[in-house]
Every structure is written in C-alpha cells, then in structure tokens.
Image: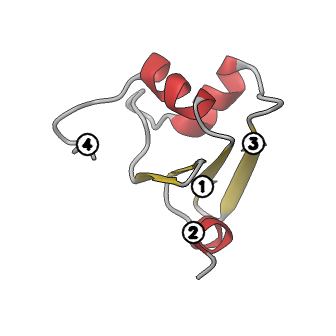
Amino acid sequence: MVNASKEKIGREAALQLARAATSVVAARGKSVLTFDMSHPPDDDTLASALLGPTGNLKAPTLRVGSTLLVGFGEAAYQQVLGK
C-alpha cells in the first residue's frame, strides 16, 4: 500500500504497474476503458488513461488480483469487484 499524497507515482512507474497486470480498468467519470495487457496499447494511450492532470497516477488505484483498477467510477468498480 502506498499513500499517494506522500509518494507520487509518475508516468514510468505507472506504466510498469500496468504492464505487470493482466488487465487494466481505467475509470474517468462514467467512462470506463478496459485494456487487455496481453495486447497492450501504446504507452501514450495507456498513460493517458492512467495519469491525472498532475502527471501522476490517478487515485484511487487498486490492484485486485491481476487487474489494475485506476480512477473512480461506479461502473468500473462493479465490473471489477462485482458489487
């Protein structure tokens, strides 16, 4: 566990987290993007889904099994957590 207010995670570290996952679910409001990391998108596309306006990894970010859940959106949480 990392406290994002004390330890910032930049572009390269965020991309490494995503590459270690089998899927990435990125939420932005009601929009949800799902990436199958066996066929990953290019770094710029992935980074635009992972990073917020500060250039750091969006919060909240959770690793659920082999899935990386980035940002907050009710639909994304239902998709990953089944709730």
Residue drawn 77% across the image and 28% down it: 40
Q: In what element is the residue under mark 2? A: helix
**Real-space CA distance between mark 4 and mark 2, rounded to the nearest whole angstrom:** 20 Å
Q: Amino acid at mark 1?
A: Ala
| Proximity of marks 1 and 2: CB atoms separated by less than 8 Å | yes
Which is nearer the N-term, disc 1 or disc 4? 4
**Real-space CA distance between mark 3 and mark 4, rounded to the nearest whole angstrom:** 23 Å
Q: How many neighbours does mark 3 have within 10 angstroms: few (below 14), some (14-19), or many (20 or more)?
A: some
Residue 27 x, y percent position in the rendering:
60, 55
**Real-space CA distance between mark 2 and mark 3, rounded to the nearest whole angstrom:** 15 Å
Q: Which residue is mark 2?
A: 77
Question: Residue 35: which numbered mark, if any?
Answer: 3
Q: Nearer the viewer, mark 1 or mark 2?
A: 2
Q: Horizontally, is 53 left or right of 79 in the view?
A: left
| Proximity of marks 1 and 4: CB atoms separated by less than 8 Å | no
**Real-space CA distance between mark 1 and mark 4, rounded to the nearest whole angstrom:** 20 Å
Which is nearer the N-term, disc 1 or disc 3? 1
Q: Amino acid at mark 4?
A: Val
Q: Amino acid at mark 3?
A: Phe
Question: Residue 2: which numbered mark, if any?
Answer: 4
Which is nearer the N-term, disc 2 or disc 3? 3
Which is nearer the N-term, disc 3 or disc 4? 4
Q: In what element is the residue under mark 3? A: strand
